Amino acid sequence: MDEQSKNEGLDIAGFGKIAKAIPKEVYERSAATLLTTFEKLTAPITETTSGLGRYLRQKFDNMVEVEKAIATYTIEKAIYRAKQRCERFGGSLHAPVHPKSFVRAIEEASKETDPLLHEMWSNLLASQLSEDVCHPHFVEVLPHFSPADARLLLSLFRRSEVGENEGGFLTFSADSFTYWVNKTGGDLNPWSLSCEMLIEFRFADLLGPKPRQNGVAILYRTASGDAFLTAVSSPKE
């Protein structure tokens, strides 16, 4: 992997960088090269975890060739970014705390070619190898994430940052709102399925604007949403 590929990432802070498509060279490696590279990359991760190395090898063997190529490329990026996390936050690379979730993340990443979501998988794997910031639930949620969901979550503020509000809603349904704002006085945005999905994941919640407006809600990012963004973000952010 070249230096440019290593330094690309998901710019959570300001959408500054756009995730790049997987290079075509990734798909051109031979099967033998992929296997050797994959085993070399995963050996330091699995050497202290009984059985994990054999399990990963079996999963890798069962992938089709294109999945093997993407999986190897993803692990390369994840290990590089895990080292960046360790340099920034301290600590050292370690075996994943939740091996089952780690294996699931590799499997899911091997099927993902959307640039934004692939970056999120790479960073999620990195967080599992460097810090305990990746809850196993995040590995279950990300397969259901769309690029629109990711961009919406990035645009939200924390509850403490939305300004004056009328508090939460005692009851509401999917048909309760026509628009959402990210803070009191903010621009009206059409209510969408992504709003409902983030609420379902518990990554976002609702407050009433001040003064209340019929069909309008403040959509804000929860502590769980913050934790998820930390896990799927490039360490430099």
Image (cartoon, grey):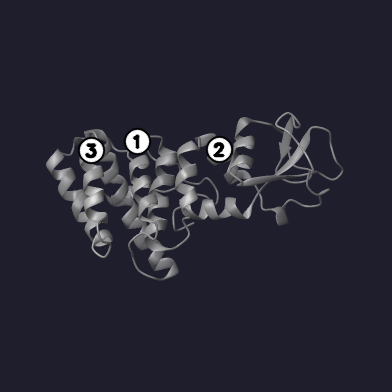
Question: Which residue is denoted by mark 3 in the rendering?
Answer: 62
Looking at the rendered structure, the secondary structure element under dot 1 is loop
Seen in the picture, residue 75 relative to 145 is either above or below; the reply is: below
Residue 194: image quadrant is top right
Q: How far apart in space, not on screen, are marks 2 and 3 (Cα)?
A: 31 Å
Q: CA distance from mark 2 to mark 1?
A: 19 Å
Closer to the chain start, of discs 2 and 1, is 1
The Cα–Cα distance between marks 3 and 1, rounded to whole angstroms, is 13 Å
Circle 2 SS class: helix
- Report whether residue 1 is seen: no
Q: Residue at x 46, y 44 (%)?
A: 140
Residue at (39% x, 50% y) in the render: 101
Q: Mark 3: which amino acid?
A: Asn
**In the image, what residue type sits under mark 1?**
Lys
Q: Position of residue 176 (x, y in %)?
A: 76, 31
Compare residues 175 and 19 and report the one nearer the observer.
175
Q: Residues within 10 Å of mark 1 (few under 14, many from 20)?
A: some
Nearer to me, 37 or 139 = 139
Q: Residue at x 28, y 51 (%)?
A: 76
Disc sitting over residue 111 in the figure = 1
Residue 178 appears in which quarter of the rendering?
top right
In the image, is 159 to the left or to the right of 8? right
Task: Tell me the number on the disc at residue 138.
Answer: none
Q: Would residue 15 be found to the left or right of residue 29 on screen? A: right
Question: Mark 3: which secondary structure?
Answer: loop
Residue 28, x across and y down, in percent:
19, 35
Q: Look at discs 2 and 1 and give the one toward the viewer.
A: 1
Asked whether 70 or 155 is in front, the reply is 70
Mark 3 or 1, nearer chain start: 3
Label of residue 149 in the image:
2
**x and y percent of residue 180 in the render?**
72, 37
Crowd tier of the residue under label 3, counting other residues whose Cα lies within 10 Å: few below 14, some 14–19, many 20 or above: few
